[in-house]
Image (cartoon, grey):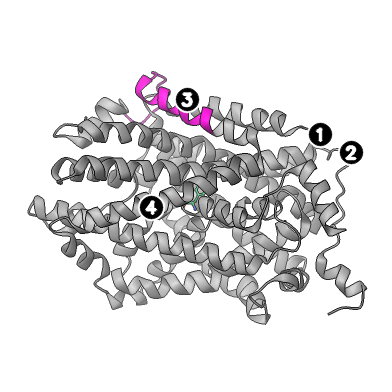
Amino acid sequence: MSEQVHHEEAKIRGAFSSRKVFIFAAIGSAVGLGNIWRFPYVAYENGGGAFIIPYLVALLCAGIPFLFLDYSLGHRNRGSAPLSFARLRRGAEGLGWWQVGICFMIAVYYAAVIAWAVRYTFFSIDKAWGSDPEGYFFGDFLQAGDPGVQADLVPGVLIPLVIVWVAVIAIMVAGVQKGIGATSVVFIPILFLAFGVLVVQALLLDGAAQGLDALFTPNWDALTEPGVWGAAFGQIFFSLSIGFGIMITYSSYVHRDTDMTGSGAVVGFANSSFELLAGIGVFAALGFMAQANGVAVSEVASDGIGLAFIAFPTIISEAPAGALIGVLFFASLVIAGLTSLVSVIEVVISAVRDKFEMSRVGAALAVSVPCMIISLIFFSTTSGIFVLDIVDHFINLFGILLVAVVSMLVISWGFRSLPMLADHLNHNGSVHIGTWWRVLISVVAPLALSYILIDQFITDVDTPYEGYPQWMLLTFGWGAAVAVIVFGFLATSVPWRSETSLEAPPSAADTNASRGGS
Ligand code: PHE
């Protein structure tokens, strides 16, 4: 009977064919640019080796518990983020649409970074940046002018961006299993392999040990700084792809009888392992760069765009086997980014499909094509990079983290749903969810995240982020964060398609209870 229900449901909404495919897709989402270009520097800046303590605390006290919460919502309620929230309580639907709005925005700019990495994979072969990677990136490649909106097209970005979108649209049209599932099963092992080879290459470079020293030497004093703890919680939330609808969506495609908690433990472990691997690879390479230029590692350490598009090209130019390192590094960025990009777009597609009577292909196109067009308008022009930087900063904080805190508080204190959700997870789960989970979700994690948010809010109000003009920050930063909330509320007024039931489907745990089981 449960088999039949699963097949029916799979036909209507799509589904992963097995637990393995789900785990690969979830790892594909979690392992993204954040692991490669964000974690190493965050760890280095916040105590080095000592960062392991706040990191593990954040992982175990907020990351994994919240991952379980996302899983329980999607897996129990069998819906996209808005449908899963609506099935929890009718009035909570807007939280799901808020997440959908965030995902839409992220998709628009994430694609641009992947497009740059596609270009740089090829640039690595002949070291196209010559002796001035920085000037090349901003001047020759992006053709960035002053921060401001100019709409001059940059063909060197436009073409790879179109290619990225065509690939993404093909995956989205192919569907949950044949598109997302198959892509992840093929590319995630390739990613781990390619990155593994890259790390070995990096460790062979002169000066690698110096880089690792810089990364791992513990600064125990850092543990007394609240900002260090905040950085750990922020990194974990972003890195595990939790709180923004992705894991709700993916777990709604998993067979009802699946062990979700065991799967979550696997995903969390794989994600953190990749993060550690990236830290080693990146800092070994930075150690080489420091030694080659006769400076301290602190002079060359950086993250994000600066690390990938300025420091790495320098390393690639100077290192023996530089071209190999370059191709492996940028190809890894492309794969890690692509499997994360499809996960954010699926949040939107799934919601559209649940809400309206739309076929897979229809919804995939209705979502991806506008997303592509906006992405092309903003990011193939000369001021793309500034908009990207601003949206990224504000959406990560006042989008992802804010919606995470609000939903935790609403679910635990407003609806008091945690015991029911815990029962659901425990029914087939191999990690037992006890009182500890409720305490972490209702008290510990919200306190930690609220602290980060308030602290960052004050900073961003006091000092304009990166010195950008106020009007840009208001439009693309604060404006974007508010727009997704407004969108969330407006979307709830659109009626659901006729056959979508807003009743929560019976959980395996309920059926068993009614039979008089545990
Ligand atoms: N976990 C992803 C990362 O580390 C976060 C992310 C997912 C970002 C999906 C964008 C889209 O990069």
Q: How far is disc 2 from disc 4 in space, using C-alphas?
A: 47 Å
Marks 2 and 1: CB-CB under 8 Å? yes
The residue to which callout 2 is attached is 498
Q: Which residue is painted at 85% across and 44% down in the image?
A: 500
Instruction: Note whether residue 102 is visible.
Output: no
| Figure quadrant of the N terminus | bottom right
The residue to which callout 1 is attached is 357
The residue to which callout 3 is attached is 162
**First in sequence: mark 1 or mark 3?**
3
Q: Position of residue 261 (x, y in %)?
A: 64, 69
- Which amino acid does the dot numbered 1 rest on? Glu
> Label 1 neighbourhood size at 10 Å, few (<14), some (14-19), many (20+)?
some
Q: Secondary structure at mark 1?
A: loop
Q: Is residue 322 magenta?
A: no
- Which amino acid does the dot numbered 4 rest on? Leu
Q: Position of residue 201 (x, y in %)?
A: 23, 53
Q: Is residue 139 left or right of residue 490?
A: left
The residue to which callout 4 is attached is 193
Marks 3 and 4: CB-CB under 8 Å? no
Q: Residue 305 versus residue 7: which sits nearer the camera?
A: 7
Q: Position of residue 11 (x, y in %)?
A: 79, 42
In this view, the mark in front (1 or 4): 4
In this view, the mark in front (2 or 4): 4
> Label 4 neighbourhood size at 10 Å, few (<14), some (14-19), many (20+)?
some
Instruction: Note whether residue 101 is visible.
Output: yes
Q: How far is disc 3 from disc 4 in space, using C-alphas?
A: 27 Å
**First in sequence: mark 2 or mark 4?**
4
Marks 2 and 4: CB-CB under 8 Å? no
